């Protein structure tokens, strides 16, 4: 990691009053959450493109639930990593941190972030296809769970291909961008929607954008700085500098 970039990033974080953070699969992968792209193992028998649609759910309910039951079971075993916690810690009375995430694992909320906009819904949530019934639980609900109120099917509370984003989530994300004075794009390539338009909206406003990604992405040469490192490591490195300055100076103690 380039230390002068880390120090700059820490400077901007320290002076920001409203930070908008966009996180993607790379952030979750460092907590051990398997991504769609993971080849082999238990995931190889599932093709998300064929399963993560409303049509697949009505055609092949048990298969779709089998995949989500496996993912929900995996989520019971994972915890937020230090990078998630750093983002939560950056919230102060004078600094808001809005986390916009494409991840469905809820790890930002678990880490203590108070403003999390989950664009693709939540793996923990299960809701009725017919009535407003919804629960937040990682319990195994069985092969084809039914709504306790109306006995219609329950479905995972995530956004499937071809579905609209949860009502309000996109507007909230755009609002977070409209007010931010610093943006971070972490663990997502920035070319896939909606990350791409969010990054564009930030850059159009002339706001500084820090990319954290171990790989070069299409966003890298448009970002103000691109930190080529793991999400956790980069956030810890920036936080070490932020914390250093957040401590009272010697003058103010005497
Ligand atoms: Zn119902």
Image (spheres, helix red, strand yellow):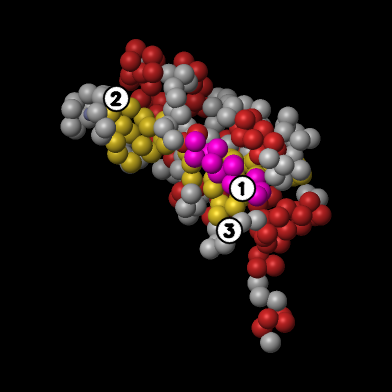
Q: Secondary structure at mark 1?
A: loop
Q: Is ligand 1 closer than 8 angstroms to the Cβ of mark 2? A: yes
Name the residue carrying label 3: 95
Q: Is disc 2 surrounded by few (<14), some (14 to 19) or many (20+) residues within 10 Å?
A: some
Q: Can residue 145 be seen from the camera position used here?
A: no
42 lies left or right of 201 = left
Q: Nearer the viewer, mark 3 or mark 2?
A: 3
Residue drawn at (28%, 29%) of the image = 128
Front residue (pair 238, 168): 168
| Magenta part of the chain | 171-183
- Location of residue 76 by image quarter: top left
Q: Secondary structure at mark 3?
A: loop
- Location of residue 152 by image quarter: top left
Residue drawn at (61%, 34%) of the image = 198
The percent coordinates of residue 141 (x first, y second) are 28, 33
Mark found first going from the N terminus, 2 or 1: 2
Residue 128 sits inside the magenta stretch: no
Q: Can residue 147 be seen from the camera position used here?
A: yes
Front residue (pair 205, 128): 205
Name the residue carrying label 2: 129
Q: Is disc 3 surrounded by few (<14), some (14 to 19) or many (20+) residues within 10 Å?
A: some
- Circle number at residue 123: none
Q: Nearer the viewer, mark 2 or mark 1?
A: 1
Separation of residues labelled 1 and 3 (CA atoms): 10 Å
Q: Is ligand 1 closer than 8 angstroms to the Cβ of mark 1? A: no
55 lies left or right of 48 = left
């Amino acid at each position: 990691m380039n230390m002068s970039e880390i120090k700059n990033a820490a400077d901007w974080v320290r002076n920001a009053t409203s930070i908008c953070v966009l996180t993607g699969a790379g952030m979750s992968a460092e907590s051990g959450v398997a991504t769609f792209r993971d080849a082999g193992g238990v995931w190889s028998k599932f093709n998300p493109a064929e399963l993560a649609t409303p049509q697949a759910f009505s055609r092949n309910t048990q298969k779709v639930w089998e995949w989500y039951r496996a993912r929900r079971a995996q989520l019971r075993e994972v915890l937020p990593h230090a990078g998630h916690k750093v983002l939560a810690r950056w919230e102060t009375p004078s600094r808001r941190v809005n986390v916009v995430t494409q991840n469905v694992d809820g790890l930002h909320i678990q880490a203590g972030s108070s403003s999390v906009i989950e664009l693709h819904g939540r793996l923990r949530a299960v809701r009725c296809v017919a009535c407003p019934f919804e629960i937040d639980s990682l319990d195994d609900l069985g092969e084809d769970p039914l709504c306790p109120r109306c006995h219609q099917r329950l479905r995972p509370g995530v956004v499937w291909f071809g579905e609209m984003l949860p009502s309000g989530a996109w507007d909230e994300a755009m609002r977070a961008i409209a007010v931010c004075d610093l943006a971070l794009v972490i663990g997502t390539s920035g070319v896939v929607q909606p990350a791409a338009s969010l990054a564009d909206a930030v850059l159009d406003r002339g706001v500084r954008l820090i990319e954290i990604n171990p790989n070069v992405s299409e966003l890298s040469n448009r970002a103000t700085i691109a930190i080529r490192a793991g999400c956790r490591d980069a956030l810890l490195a920036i936080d070490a500098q932020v914390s250093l300055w957040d401590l009272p100076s010697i003058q103010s103690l005497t």
